[in-house]
Image (tube, rainbow, N blue to C red):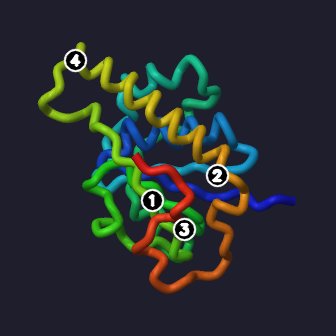
Amino acid sequence: MTKKYKVLFLCRENSARSIMAEALLRELAGHRFEAFSAGPEPALRVHPFAVAQLRPGVSDLGVLCPKSWLEFTGEWAPRMDLVIALDESVAASHTPVFPGDPELAAWHLADPLADDVCDPERIRLFEKVFWQIVRQLSAFIEAPQDALPARTTPVRGARTRAPASLPNV
């Protein structure tokens, strides 16, 4: 049996970008990856515009909900292979220590929930970010098996470097 890679997507409120990334990775390559998402300030619900982007192609929207990244930091938490920050507020220097010392990567995407964005523009920004995530995930999924994190024991110093073979925005 092939090991499924555990991937945790992070964004501040865990209601839009990270939720879309989690749902899309699960839908596109759930046979190879276990996808999770979280944030330091989780919202009360998934943003309706994120749900609207996902609804046409994602089969199980009911499992999506904002979570605190603290759910992934204790001894009981699943051991991630890779943690991907989707905005600068959750970059490596701001994240807690995750068990298993996973690799860290950054895909900085525009924040569709920014205060200075009006609703008609917000809808277009959600669509743009959705397709950016699709492209990033497509490249990630197509990466050779040996380019993905495969270690089962922690490597000291790994928290500060992003895997060279994974795409960055």
Mark 2 element type: strand
Q: Residue at x 38, y 25 (%)?
A: 128
Mark 1 element type: strand
The numbered disc on residue 119 is: 4
In the image, residue 82 lies at what x, y percent? 54, 62
Residue highlighted by disc 1? 105
Q: Are marks 3 and 4 in contact (CB under 8 Å)?
A: no
Q: Earlier in the sequence, mark 3 or mark 1?
A: 3
Q: Quadrant of the N terminus?
A: bottom right
Q: Are marks 1 and 4 in contact (CB under 8 Å)?
A: no
Nearer the camera: disc 3 or disc 2: 2
Nearer the camera: disc 1 or disc 4: 1
Amino acid at dot 2: Glu
Amino acid at dot 1: Ala
57 and 84: which one is in front? 84
Q: Earlier in the sequence, mark 1 or mark 4?
A: 1
131 and 119: which one is in front? 131
Q: Earlier in the sequence, mark 2 or mark 4?
A: 2
The numbered disc on residue 135 is: none
Mark 3 element type: loop
Q: Are marks 3 and 1 in contact (CB under 8 Å)?
A: no
Amino acid at dot 4: Asp
The numbered disc on residue 77 is: 3
Residue highlighted by disc 2? 34
* Residue situated furthest top in the rendering: 120
- Compared across the picture, whether 108 is left or right of 137 comes to left
The answer for how far apart the CA atoms under marks 3 and 2 are is 13 Å
Q: Earlier in the sequence, mark 1 or mark 2?
A: 2
Residue 32 visible, this orientation: yes
Q: Residue at x 64, y 51 (%)?
A: 34
